[in-house]
Image (tube, grey):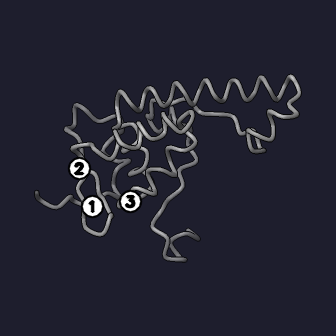
């Protein structure tokens, strides 16, 4: 409610990834920059960081195989987006700079993207039998322009 009052298009969905029908794993928040944490990590923190890196690596691999995972998640919260928005979403879902760049390139080269101009995109809806999410959860996405 407060976001729309401020003119912000983004929406926050507090449901789990599973409830949103997103096929990525949730990570556990570490709370401090990983580089600083590694320097003085207790065994518990080290285990948590190793788990986080494993999950983000697996999520990145999933996104590389199916970039629609990222597009569905991003467009669930906002109808239009930029490459920067995609990058913001991917930075906590991928492991390391190399995988991040590969995922960003893969998502941005999707045939589903339609550029509206000045680096703003919408995503064409998938065929009903290909959708990860129910049609009702995609209501905020406008009709994409014809190519």
Quick check: 137 above or below 18?
below
Pinpoint residue 39: horizontal percent, then vertical percent.
84, 34
On residue 81, the disc is 3
Left or right placement of residue 131 versus residue 103 in this view: left
- Helix, strand or loop at label 2? It is loop
Name the residue located 80 percent from the left edge and 33 percent from the top edge: 38
Of residue 72 and residue 87, the one placed in the foreground of this image is: 87
Q: In terms of depth relative to the viewer, which is nearer, 58 or 3?
A: 58
Q: Looking at the image, tell me whether mark 3 or mark 2 is earlier in sequence order.
A: 3
Picture residue at 78% right of the left edge, 44% below the top? 32
Q: Which mark is residue 124?
A: 2
Secondary structure under the numbered disc 1 in the rendered image: loop
Residue at 70 percent across and 24 percent down: it is: 50
In the visual, does 95 lie left or right of 31? left
The spot of residue 139 in percent (x, y) is 33, 55
Residue at image mark 1: 142
């Amino acid at each position: 409610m407060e976001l729309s009052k401020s003119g912000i298009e983004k929406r926050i969905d507090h449901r789990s990834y599973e409830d949103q029908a997103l096929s990525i794993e949730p990570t556990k928040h570490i709370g401090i920059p990983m580089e600083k944490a590694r320097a003085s990590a207790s065994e518990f923190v080290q285990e948590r960081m190793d788990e986080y890196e494993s999950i983000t690596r697996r999520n990145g691999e999933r996104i590389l195989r199916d970039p629609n995972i990222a597009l569905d998640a991003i467009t669930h919260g906002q109808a239009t987006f930029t490459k920067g928005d995609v990058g913001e979403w991917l930075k906590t879902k991928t492991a390391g700079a190399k995988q991040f760049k590969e995922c960003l390139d893969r998502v941005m080269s999707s045939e589903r993207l339609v550029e509206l101009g000045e680096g703003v995109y919408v995503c064409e809806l998938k065929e009903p039998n290909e959708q990860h999410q129910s049609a009702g959860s995609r209501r905020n996405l406008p009709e994409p322009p014809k190519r």
